[in-house]
Amino acid sequence: MSSRLRNVFLYGALAATLAAVWWSQRLPEEEDAVVENTERVRPAIRSDQPASSAANAGQKKPVRLAEAKLDAFAPRDWTPPPPPPPKYT
């Protein structure tokens, strides 16, 4: 492809992009497309009642990154395990 033809394609793509941006700015805004901000509501925990172990049994405690003690730069061995030895009958 010659450099002149490549420049024509590049300038055409630039013109199409600018036209699409200009056209999208002129579209009327739809009021229905606005999403309202919703808040997550957490259940209130009263301090006078201890949390039951049955209620917390299904919940996992989140692991913090500092507590995980993972070494991202530790050496890894990605070789598959050796096949099992053949069985002789």
Image: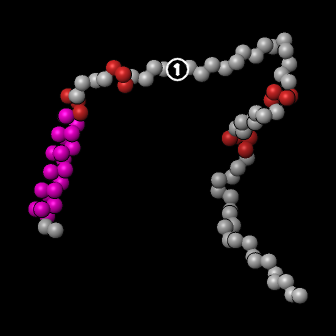
What residue did someone put label 1 on? 38
58 up-or-down from 16: above or below: above
| Highlighted magenta segment, given as a residue range | 3-23
Give how far across and how far down residue 48 sits, in percent.
84, 12
Q: Is residue 19 magenta?
A: yes
Q: Position of residue 8 (x, y in %)?
A: 12, 56
Look at the image and say whether residue 20 sits in the magenta stretch: yes
Q: Position of residue 75 (x, y in %)?
A: 68, 62
Q: Quadrant of residue 62?
A: top right
> SS at mark 1?
loop
Please determine whether, in this image, residue 7 is positioned above or below residue 46.
Answer: below
In-image side of 68 versus 48 (left or right): left
Residue at (72%, 15%) from the top-left corner?
A: 44
Density class for disc 1 (Cα within 10 Å; few <14, some 14-19, many ≥20) is few
Decide if residue 85 is on the left or right side of residue 72: right
Q: Residue 54: percent from the left, percent from the top?
A: 85, 29
